[in-house]
Amino acid sequence: MIVVNTETIPGMRIVQVRGIVQGNTVRSKHMGRDIMAGFKNLVGGELKGYTELLTEARREALSRMLGEAEQLGANAVVNVRFSTSAVTQGAAELYAYGTAVIAETEDEF
């Protein structure tokens, strides 16, 4: 499955649009990580627990989006975007979406 954040795929042409596909997940870290993140907030620096949280969430949302694209018979998803939002303190939603398409290699003339 080809996944791009552009409207086109270089060297390929889109021959059919299958529709919008999406995937999302809501994740939270355990209380111990929240407490450690609170301490880290006081001194500054990366909150590694939350970086891991968003990395896991991005993978999950992307996987779910690609599953929808496969169900539609697509071989590519174009114009992929990610969005995040806080659901509650310590929990975040990550949402991935794009357009499922069938793309073919351009014939060389």
Image (tube, grey):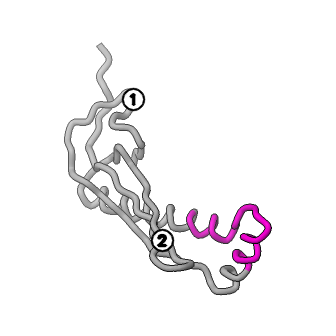
- Residue 47 in which image quadrant: bottom right
Residue stretch rendered in magenta on the structure: 36-54
- Residue 67 in which image quadrant: bottom left
The percent coordinates of residue 70 (x first, y second) are: 31, 57
* Residue at the extreme top of the image, as rendered: 109
The percent coordinates of residue 65 (x first, y second) are: 36, 60
Q: Main secondary structure of the magenta part?
A: helix
Residue at the (75%, 61%) spot, across then down? 45
In the image, taking residue 51 as reference, residue 104 lies left or right, namely left
Labels 2 and 1: the sequence-earlier one: 1
Residue at the (37%, 64%) spot, across then down? 23
Q: Is residue 17 above or below residue 90?
A: above
Task: Quickly name the residue at label 1.
Answer: 10
In the image, taking residue 71 as reference, residue 35 lies left or right, namely right
Tell me if residue 24 is in the magenta stretch: no
Q: Residue type at mark 2?
A: Ala
Q: Nearer the viewer, residue 62 or 42?
A: 42
Q: Nearer the viewer, residue 32 or 73?
A: 32
How many C-alpha atoms fall within 10 Å of the one at disc 1: few (<14), some, or many (≥20)? few
The percent coordinates of residue 85 (x first, y second) are: 45, 67
Task: Quickly name the residue at label 2.
Answer: 86
* Residue at the extreme right of the image, as rendered: 43
How many C-alpha atoms fall within 10 Å of the one at disc 2: few (<14), some, or many (≥20)? few
